[in-house]
Image: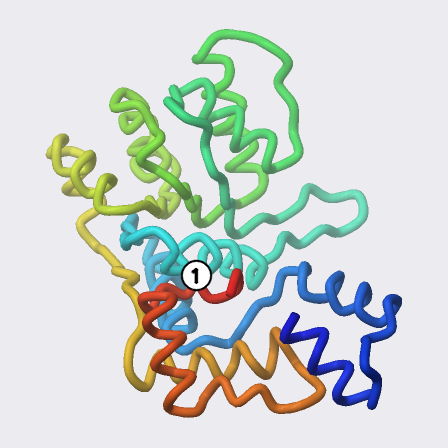
């Protein structure tokens, strides 16, 4: 309604044109990649881990932008496809299903790389996954919602690093930390950790300003960055970036 009123005011109309309003709704539903400072820092950190082939974790509460940051990192390092050649895929980004066993994990990776394996044993899926990971020259695998992995699956996750020298990034909440610490072998390989948190102070104000300009892009100023509105927004969102858009 704020968006509609802003367009109506800008156009000098009592009601916004329905076609224009629908176009704006469609625009707002599209994904937007914002140049947020804390996301850029996370990407720089991931660059270092990928170059060093070091496995790591990204941890933080829900709604702090972990998944969006990791997905954006994949798009920053998109696959390279040349005619008649295998694609080069620097970064694989997957979200495994609930209670993900080894076979499910290998299938997610194979599907992401747009290869197929119809059926077979866990060993068949493992062999196929390793084959396509090598063929596509994968440097990093980002496993989002990694707390969905079954405990026995972590042994295969370790193999991506141990046998293929691929950097593996486990992404999740503090629940993931608890799971990792249960297995010394896993903990030792994923000690490096980047933490996402909620925003406050100047960081929150900067983010709101970018969000207002790049996402909302209203035709008239909404004054979301003034002191009183900042107080309201901070109270309403708790500083969680994922709670900002629904407002």
Nearer-the-camera pick, 160 or 204: 204
Residue position marked by numbered label 1 in the rendering: 243
Residue drawn where x is 25% and y is 40% of the image: 176
- Give above or below for 187 relative to 30: above
Q: Is residue 143 left or right of residue 93?
A: left
Q: Is residue 5 above or below residue 196?
A: below
Question: In the rendered image, which quarter contains the N terminus?
Answer: bottom right
Q: Nearer the viewer, residue 77 or 71?
A: 71
Disc 1 crowd, CA 10 A, few/some/many (<14, 14-19, 20+): some
Residue 146 sits in quarter = top left
Image side of residue 110 versus residue 187, left or right: right
Q: How many marks?
A: 1
Residue 34 shown left or right of residue 64 in the figure: right
Instruction: Answer above or below: position of 98 versus 27.
Output: above
The vertical placement of 214 against 151, above or below, is below
Give percent across and percent down for residue 243: 43, 61
Give me the residue at 61% from left, 66% from top: 32
For label 1, the SS is helix
Q: Position of residue 42 (x, y in %)?
A: 36, 66
In the rendered structure, the answer to whether residue 70 lies left or right of residue 222 reads left
Residue 5: give x, y in percent of width and height. Answer: 70, 79
């Amino acid at each position: 309604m704020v968006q509609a009123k802003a367009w109506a005011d800008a156009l000098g109309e009592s009601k916004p044109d329905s076609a224009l309003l629908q176009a704006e709704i469609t625009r707002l539903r599209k994904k937007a990649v914002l140049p947020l400072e804390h996301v850029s820092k996370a990407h720089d950190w991931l660059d270092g881990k990928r170059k060093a082939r070091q496995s790591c974790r990204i941890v933080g509460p829900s709604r702090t932008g972990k998944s969006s940051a990791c997905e954006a990192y994949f798009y920053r390092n998109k696959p390279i496809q040349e005619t008649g050649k295998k694609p080069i895929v620097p970064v694989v980004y997957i979200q495994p299903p609930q209670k993900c066993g080894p076979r499910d994990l290998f299938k997610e990776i194979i599907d992401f790389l747009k290869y197929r394996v119809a059926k077979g044993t866990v060993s068949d899926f493992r062999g196929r996954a390793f084959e396509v990971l090598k063929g596509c020259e994968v440097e990093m695998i980002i496993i989002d919602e990694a707390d969905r992995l079954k405990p026995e699956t972590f042994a295969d996750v370790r193999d991506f690093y141990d046998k293929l020298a691929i950097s593996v990034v486990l992404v999740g909440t503090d629940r993931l930390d608890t799971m990792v610490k249960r297995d010394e072998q896993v903990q030792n390989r994923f000690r490096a950790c980047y933490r996402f948190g909620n925003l406050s102070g100047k960081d929150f104000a900067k983010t709101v300003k970018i969000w207002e300009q790049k996402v909302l892009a209203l035709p008239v100023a909404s004054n979301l960055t003034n002191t009183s509105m900042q107080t309201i927004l901070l109270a309403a969102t708790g500083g969680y970036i994922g709670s900002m858009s629904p407002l």
